[in-house]
Amino acid sequence: NADYKRADGKNVRTVRDVIVELDRDGNVVDDFRLYEILDPYRDIVLKTLDQGAVCLNIDAKKAGHTASSDELQSMDTHDKWGDIVGAGPGRNWAHVNSVDYDPSDDSIIISSRHQDAVIKIGRDKQVKWIMGAHKGWSDKFKDKLLQPVDSKGNKIVCEDEYSKCPGYESDKGGFDWQWTQHTAFRIDSKSKKGEIYLSVFDNGDTRGMEQPAIAGMKYSRAVVYKIDENKKTIEQIWEYGKERGKEWYSSVTSLTQYQDDLDSVMVYSAVAGMQFDIAKGRPVGLPSPHIDEFEWGAKEPSIEIKMTNAMGYQAFPFSLQKAFEK
């Protein structure tokens, strides 16, 4: 929204928090105003984010630093607006980085990086469910939060308001949420009305709703979840990446996407190996992105391509035949 009046009377331009639907001719059909649908003042994730690793706004001088409540609140006093991390309309509080459509009930599924949440919203602009740690959500959204379960449907209990789950606590892995995630995509061929298979790239910053004692402890994952929309439960059915640790960690961008024609999962860890010299406030060299493809359910990739000193937002396969067909 280019001219939104906040509750405090200030007019601002909202940032990355409106989804617009267009027809083939470019006419606006509908819009989803997230600053009205969600809570733009939920700041618990913003206070945990590594301020040096925000997509499109990487600032090595802020690497390893987080924002305090006082710093976030002072933004209103000093009129700090724009594409910067902060709470409330007029700042990058949502950071939506993917939108997918569910034809079974005419809804959208969004990935909100700065809320550590994947959220399904209906045509009526009502939240259907929220996938992510329960911590920090107001009472309005409590009944929308998904409950983790195991393969037998048994409830999985997580500590600290469901922000620290077994996969976070154990080196062996297990259920965990997605953190500062990208590309939350419905796997259409495996999903049906009321049951969704969802692939996502779990970047891993803010994992457990905190920063680790040592930055090198961070890791990313490619994950597939199954959501029972009627029971409001979520099961993690596949993961990869925790065992790769720091060298596969991608703080920003990246992709996990199912390939229907090959029954495989394509994964792109975009800035793997990116290093920062915190003392000098600058990156050291370029990252080494990894492209991996997995047969459905496989624990190891069928193929891995590692690039050196490269940079790219996303990588995805496409058909040359289809690209050049009339």
Image: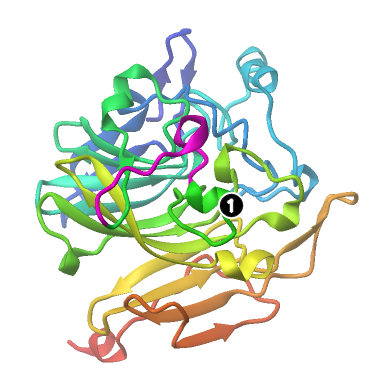
Q: Helix, strand or loop at disc 1?
A: loop
Q: Position of residue 45 (x, y in %)?
A: 54, 34
In this rendered view, identify the residue nearer to me: 286 or 226: 226
In this rendered view, identify the residue nearer to me: 311 or 80: 311
Q: Residue at x 25, y 50 (%)?
A: 153
Residue 155 lies in the magenta stretch: yes
**Residues drawn in magenta:** 152-165
190 w.r.t. 141: above or below: below
Asked if residue 326 lies left or right of residue 35, the reply is: left
Q: Amino acid at mark 1?
A: Leu
- In the picture, which quadrant includes the N terminus? top left
Asked if residue 136 lies left or right of residue 51, the reply is: left
Q: Position of residue 81 (x, y in %)?
A: 58, 27
Q: Position of residue 62 (x, y in %)?
A: 76, 42
Asked if residue 110 lies left or right of residue 116, the reply is: left
- In the picture, which quadrant includes the C terminus? bottom left
Report the residue that reaches farthest toward the top: 8
Report the residue that reaches farthest toward the bottom: 321
In this rendered view, identify the residue nearer to me: 244 or 20: 244
In this rendered view, identify the residue nearer to me: 116 or 286: 116
Q: Position of residue 23 (x, y in %)?
A: 16, 52
Mark 1 lies on residue: 56
Predominant SS of the magenta segment:
loop
17 w.r.t. 98: above or below: above
Q: Residue at x 60, y 62 (%)?
A: 250
293 w.r.t. 232: above or below: below
233 w.r.t. 3: above or below: below
Asked if residue 313 lies left or right of residue 282, the reply is: left
Report the residue that reaches farthest toward the right: 279
